[in-house]
Amino acid sequence: MASNLFKNLQDVLTHILYYYDCNSAGTFKWIFKIDKDKNIRNKIFSLIEILQKENPFSSLSYKDAELLGNINLALNSNNLEVGQITLQQLADELGLKESRIEVQQKRNKHSSIMSIIGVVLTVFFGVISILLFLFYNINE
């Protein structure tokens, strides 16, 4: 399950820093088995800063991070042609993701409608069942 929570080391360190800032010393020690110390917080914060400088796009998917890194490299090397090609690839990737989101939204909308219809039919047939039960028990 932990593999689903954290994409990279930066996420893990940010999580630890969050727990450091939001919990008491006892709770922090209970969770991480180390004492809450300002030096630890400063080291974690420094590591996060180093990781952000090394890989500023680490929170993104590999493909998006790679494309942004290539754009950054093209800008730094003043290679406009590679930058434009990579920028177009990034635009295509974002367009693809946007269309996937739209398809998922449509599916969610249809699923919601079907769920509402299911609830209405369940209540309708439940009421009919109760009425039929009462009708037959009264007539006996």
Image (cartoon, grey):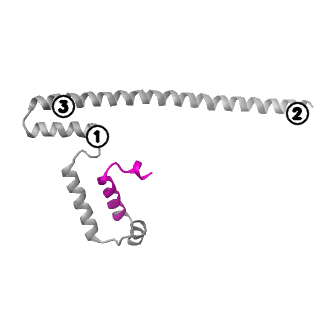
Percent position of residue 37, x then y: 30, 72
Please provide percent x and percent y for residue 132.
81, 29
29 or 63, nearer to the observer: 63
Front in this rendered view, residue 138 or 121: 121
Q: Secondary structure at mark 2?
A: helix
Q: Secondary structure at mark 1?
A: helix
Going from N to C along the chain, the mark reached first, 2 or 1, is 1
Screen quadrant of the C terminus: top right
Q: Which residue is label 1 attached to?
A: 62
The x, y position of residue 4, in whole percent, is 41, 48
Query: Looking at this rendering, what residue extends furthest in the right direction?
Result: 140
Where 122 falls versus 47 (above or below)? above
Sequence-first tag of 3 and 2: 3
Residues in magenta?
1-20
Q: Earlier in the sequence, mark 3 or mark 1?
A: 1
Identify the residue at horizontal 18%, vertical 51% (top origin).
53
Specify the amino acid type for callout 3.
Thr
- Whether tag 3 and tag 1 are in contact, CB under 8 A, the answer is no
Q: Residue at x 6, y 36 (%)?
A: 78
Q: Residues within 10 Å of mark 1 (few under 14, many from 20)?
A: few
Name the image quarter holding residue 42. bottom left
- Total labels: the figure holds 3
- The kind of secondary structure element at disc 3 is helix
- Residue labelled with disc 2: 137
Mark 3 sits on what residue?
86
In the image, what residue type sits under mark 2? Asn
